[in-house]
Image (cartoon, coloured by chain):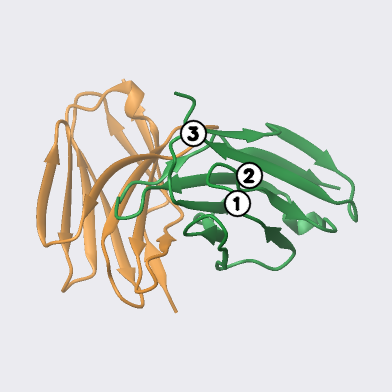
Protein backbone atom coordinates (compact mmCIF):
# COMPACT_ATOMS: atom_id res chain seq x y z
CA UNK A 1 0.00 0.00 0.00
CA UNK A 2 0.90 3.64 -0.16
CA UNK A 3 1.99 5.40 2.99
CA UNK A 4 3.17 8.83 4.03
CA UNK A 5 4.49 9.22 7.58
CA UNK A 6 5.11 12.46 9.43
CA UNK A 7 5.05 13.34 13.14
CA UNK A 8 1.64 14.27 14.50
CA UNK A 9 2.76 17.32 16.45
CA UNK A 10 5.89 19.36 17.14
CA UNK A 11 6.64 22.31 19.38
CA UNK A 12 9.29 24.96 18.80
CA UNK A 13 10.27 28.37 20.10
CA UNK A 14 9.86 31.66 18.29
CA UNK A 15 13.08 32.59 16.49
CA UNK A 16 14.38 29.03 16.45
CA UNK A 17 14.72 26.44 13.67
CA UNK A 18 12.53 23.35 13.26
CA UNK A 19 12.77 20.37 10.91
CA UNK A 20 9.64 18.41 9.99
CA UNK A 21 10.36 14.97 8.55
CA UNK A 22 8.34 12.98 6.05
CA UNK A 23 8.94 9.40 4.90
CA UNK A 24 7.02 7.80 2.09
CA UNK A 25 6.31 4.51 0.37
CA UNK A 26 4.33 4.98 -2.81
CA UNK A 27 3.71 3.26 -6.12
CA UNK A 28 5.92 5.44 -8.24
CA UNK A 29 7.27 8.90 -7.55
CA UNK A 30 6.66 12.08 -9.51
CA UNK A 31 7.49 14.72 -6.98
CA UNK A 32 7.01 15.62 -3.33
CA UNK A 33 5.07 18.61 -2.07
CA UNK A 34 4.80 20.53 1.17
CA UNK A 35 1.70 22.53 2.00
CA UNK A 36 0.87 24.76 4.94
CA UNK A 37 -2.59 24.71 6.48
CA UNK A 38 -3.69 27.12 9.19
CA UNK A 39 -6.52 25.92 11.42
CA UNK A 40 -9.87 26.22 9.70
CA UNK A 41 -8.32 27.25 6.39
CA UNK A 42 -7.37 25.67 3.08
CA UNK A 43 -3.91 24.21 2.40
CA UNK A 44 -1.51 26.50 0.56
CA UNK A 45 1.50 25.41 -1.49
CA UNK A 46 4.97 25.80 0.04
CA UNK A 47 7.44 23.76 -1.99
CA UNK A 48 8.04 21.07 -4.57
CA UNK A 49 10.96 18.64 -4.90
CA UNK A 50 11.46 16.14 -7.68
CA UNK A 51 15.27 15.81 -7.68
CA UNK A 52 17.47 14.97 -4.70
CA UNK A 53 18.76 17.91 -2.75
CA UNK A 54 17.71 21.08 -1.04
CA UNK A 55 15.32 23.70 -2.36
CA UNK A 56 15.46 27.01 -0.53
CA UNK A 57 12.72 29.61 -0.52
CA UNK A 58 13.21 32.37 2.00
CA UNK A 59 12.86 31.08 5.55
CA UNK A 60 11.63 27.71 4.29
CA UNK A 61 13.73 24.94 2.73
CA UNK A 62 12.76 21.46 1.61
CA UNK A 63 15.06 18.48 1.15
CA UNK A 64 14.52 15.26 -0.76
CA UNK A 65 16.29 11.89 -0.86
CA UNK A 66 14.50 9.61 -3.30
CA UNK A 67 16.68 6.59 -2.47
CA UNK A 68 15.68 6.86 1.18
CA UNK A 69 12.04 7.83 0.55
CA UNK A 70 12.62 10.82 2.80
CA UNK A 71 12.03 14.54 2.85
CA UNK A 72 12.14 17.30 5.40
CA UNK A 73 10.85 20.82 5.64
CA UNK A 74 13.14 23.24 7.45
CA UNK A 75 11.69 26.42 8.90
CA UNK A 76 14.12 29.08 10.10
CA UNK A 77 13.61 32.18 12.26
CA UNK A 78 10.26 30.89 13.41
CA UNK A 79 7.45 33.37 13.78
CA UNK A 80 4.18 32.97 15.65
CA UNK A 81 2.34 33.00 12.31
CA UNK A 82 4.16 29.77 11.39
CA UNK A 83 1.91 27.93 13.82
CA UNK A 84 0.00 25.66 11.44
CA UNK A 85 -0.17 22.14 10.12
CA UNK A 86 2.37 21.13 7.50
CA UNK A 87 1.26 18.54 4.98
CA UNK A 88 3.60 16.29 3.02
CA UNK A 89 2.25 14.83 -0.24
CA UNK A 90 3.76 12.59 -2.91
CA UNK A 91 2.61 12.44 -6.52
CA UNK A 92 2.42 8.79 -7.48
CA UNK A 93 2.71 6.94 -10.79
CA UNK A 94 -0.87 7.95 -11.68
CA UNK A 95 0.02 11.59 -11.06
CA UNK A 96 -2.33 11.71 -8.07
CA UNK A 97 -1.28 13.21 -4.74
CA UNK A 98 -1.02 10.91 -1.73
CA UNK A 99 -1.19 12.97 1.45
CA UNK A 100 0.26 12.53 4.90
CA UNK A 101 -1.94 13.32 7.91
CA UNK A 102 0.04 16.49 8.58
CA UNK A 103 2.29 17.77 11.37
CA UNK A 104 0.80 20.34 13.71
CA UNK A 105 3.51 22.85 14.58
CA UNK A 106 3.07 24.83 17.78
CA UNK A 107 5.25 27.92 18.21
CA UNK A 108 5.84 29.18 21.74
CA UNK A 109 7.10 32.68 22.60
CA UNK B 1 -9.29 37.34 -8.70
CA UNK B 2 -11.55 35.05 -6.68
CA UNK B 3 -9.56 31.87 -7.35
CA UNK B 4 -11.70 28.97 -6.17
CA UNK B 5 -14.99 29.38 -4.38
CA UNK B 6 -17.03 26.71 -2.63
CA UNK B 7 -20.59 26.72 -1.39
CA UNK B 8 -22.01 26.29 1.10
CA UNK B 9 -19.46 27.11 3.81
CA UNK B 10 -21.09 24.63 6.13
CA UNK B 11 -24.15 22.43 6.16
CA UNK B 12 -25.98 20.06 8.47
CA UNK B 13 -27.73 17.33 6.53
CA UNK B 14 -30.10 14.57 7.56
CA UNK B 15 -28.99 11.06 6.68
CA UNK B 16 -30.60 9.83 3.50
CA UNK B 17 -30.91 13.28 1.97
CA UNK B 18 -29.04 14.34 -1.15
CA UNK B 19 -26.82 17.34 -1.48
CA UNK B 20 -24.57 19.02 -4.03
CA UNK B 21 -21.43 20.85 -2.98
CA UNK B 22 -20.52 23.56 -5.45
CA UNK B 23 -17.04 24.49 -6.66
CA UNK B 24 -16.14 27.20 -9.16
CA UNK B 25 -12.75 28.43 -10.29
CA UNK B 26 -11.93 31.43 -12.44
CA UNK B 27 -8.31 30.57 -13.24
CA UNK B 28 -9.17 28.50 -16.33
CA UNK B 29 -7.35 25.53 -14.84
CA UNK B 30 -7.73 22.24 -16.68
CA UNK B 31 -7.66 19.92 -13.69
CA UNK B 32 -9.99 19.93 -10.68
CA UNK B 33 -10.20 17.73 -7.60
CA UNK B 34 -12.43 16.94 -4.67
CA UNK B 35 -10.85 15.89 -1.36
CA UNK B 36 -12.21 15.10 2.05
CA UNK B 37 -10.20 15.85 5.18
CA UNK B 38 -10.85 13.98 8.41
CA UNK B 39 -9.09 14.38 11.74
CA UNK B 40 -5.96 12.26 11.93
CA UNK B 41 -6.05 11.36 8.26
CA UNK B 42 -4.47 12.93 5.23
CA UNK B 43 -6.50 14.54 2.50
CA UNK B 44 -8.18 11.79 0.49
CA UNK B 45 -9.07 12.20 -3.15
CA UNK B 46 -12.72 11.51 -3.94
CA UNK B 47 -12.95 12.33 -7.65
CA UNK B 48 -10.96 14.33 -10.13
CA UNK B 49 -11.25 15.79 -13.61
CA UNK B 50 -8.26 16.34 -15.86
CA UNK B 51 -10.24 18.44 -18.33
CA UNK B 52 -13.80 19.51 -19.04
CA UNK B 53 -15.96 16.56 -20.04
CA UNK B 54 -13.89 13.93 -18.25
CA UNK B 55 -13.89 12.65 -14.68
CA UNK B 56 -12.11 9.92 -12.74
CA UNK B 57 -12.39 8.10 -9.44
CA UNK B 58 -9.99 8.79 -6.62
CA UNK B 59 -9.22 6.87 -3.47
CA UNK B 60 -12.67 7.12 -1.82
CA UNK B 61 -15.33 7.61 -4.55
CA UNK B 62 -18.17 5.50 -3.13
CA UNK B 63 -21.30 7.49 -2.31
CA UNK B 64 -20.17 10.50 -4.37
CA UNK B 65 -20.59 11.59 -7.98
CA UNK B 66 -19.21 14.50 -9.98
CA UNK B 67 -19.69 16.16 -13.33
CA UNK B 68 -17.54 18.56 -15.36
CA UNK B 69 -19.76 20.23 -17.92
CA UNK B 70 -17.39 23.17 -18.35
CA UNK B 71 -13.94 24.34 -17.27
CA UNK B 72 -15.05 26.43 -14.32
CA UNK B 73 -17.48 24.24 -12.38
CA UNK B 74 -16.99 20.90 -10.65
CA UNK B 75 -19.95 20.01 -8.39
CA UNK B 76 -19.84 17.07 -5.99
CA UNK B 77 -23.09 15.25 -5.25
CA UNK B 78 -23.97 13.00 -2.34
CA UNK B 79 -26.98 11.00 -3.52
CA UNK B 80 -27.99 9.63 -0.11
CA UNK B 81 -25.86 11.00 2.72
CA UNK B 82 -24.59 8.79 5.56
CA UNK B 83 -22.99 9.88 8.86
CA UNK B 84 -19.56 8.63 7.71
CA UNK B 85 -19.60 11.37 5.09
CA UNK B 86 -19.32 13.96 7.85
CA UNK B 87 -16.10 15.73 6.92
CA UNK B 88 -14.52 18.88 5.55
CA UNK B 89 -14.58 18.89 1.77
CA UNK B 90 -12.00 20.77 -0.26
CA UNK B 91 -12.11 21.49 -3.95
CA UNK B 92 -8.80 22.19 -5.72
CA UNK B 93 -7.57 23.00 -9.20
CA UNK B 94 -4.30 22.99 -11.08
CA UNK B 95 -3.03 23.92 -14.49
CA UNK B 96 -1.89 20.99 -16.60
CA UNK B 97 1.84 20.61 -16.25
CA UNK B 98 1.92 22.83 -13.18
CA UNK B 99 2.79 21.40 -9.82
CA UNK B 100 0.75 23.57 -7.51
CA UNK B 101 -2.83 22.79 -6.55
CA UNK B 102 -4.96 25.73 -5.44
CA UNK B 103 -7.57 24.97 -2.82
CA UNK B 104 -10.98 26.44 -2.13
CA UNK B 105 -11.95 27.47 1.42
CA UNK B 106 -13.73 24.18 2.12
CA UNK B 107 -17.23 23.03 3.05
CA UNK B 108 -17.84 21.61 6.50
CA UNK B 109 -20.55 18.95 6.20
CA UNK B 110 -22.24 17.23 9.11
CA UNK B 111 -24.55 14.29 8.40
CA UNK B 112 -26.85 13.34 11.25
Q: Position of residue B73 (x, y in %)?
A: 60, 43
Q: Position of residue B49 (x, y in %)?
A: 52, 58
Q: Are marks 2 and 3 on the same chain?
A: yes
Q: Is residue A7 above or below residue A58?
A: below
Q: What residue is shown at x 29% (from left), y 34% (from top)?
A: A12
Q: What residue is shown at x 63% (from left), y 52% (from top)?
A: B69
Give the CA separation, mark 2 to mark 3: 22 Å
Q: What residue is shown at x 17% (from left), y 59% (from top)?
A: A64
Q: What residue is shown at x 70% (from left), y 68% (from top)?
A: B62
Q: Residues within 10 Å of mark 2 (few under 14, many from 20)?
A: many
Query: Mark 2 — residue?
Result: B88
* Left or right of B1, for residue A52: left
Label 2 vs label 3, nearer the camera: 3
- First-in-chain label (2 vs 3): 3
Q: Is residue A12 above or below residue B21?
A: above
> In which quadrant of the rendered view does residue B96 lie?
bottom left
Nearer to the camera, B45 or B49: B49
Query: Mark 3 — residue?
Result: B26
Give the CA separation, mark 1 to mark 3: 27 Å
Contact (Cβ within 8 Å) of mark 1 with mark 2 = yes
The quadrant of the rendering that contains the N terminus of chain B is top left
Chain letter of the residue beneath label 3 in the structure image: B
> In which quadrant of the rendered view does residue A40 lie?
top right
Give the CA separation, mark 1 to mark 2: 7 Å
**Chain painted in orange in the figure:** A
The colour of chain B is: green
Callout 2: helix, strand or loop? strand
Chain letter of the residue beneath label 2 in the structure image: B
Nearer to the camera, B40 or B5: B5
Q: Position of residue A14 (x, y in %)?
A: 25, 24
| Residue B16: image tag | none
Query: Mark 1 — residue?
Result: B38
Amino acid sequence: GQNIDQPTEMTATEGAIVQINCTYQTSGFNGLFWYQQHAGEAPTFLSYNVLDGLEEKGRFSSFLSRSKGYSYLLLKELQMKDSASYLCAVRDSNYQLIWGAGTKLIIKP
Amino acid sequence: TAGITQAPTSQILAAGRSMTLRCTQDMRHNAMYWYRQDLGLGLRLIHYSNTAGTTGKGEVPDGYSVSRANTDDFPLTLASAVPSQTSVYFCASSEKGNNEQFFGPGTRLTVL
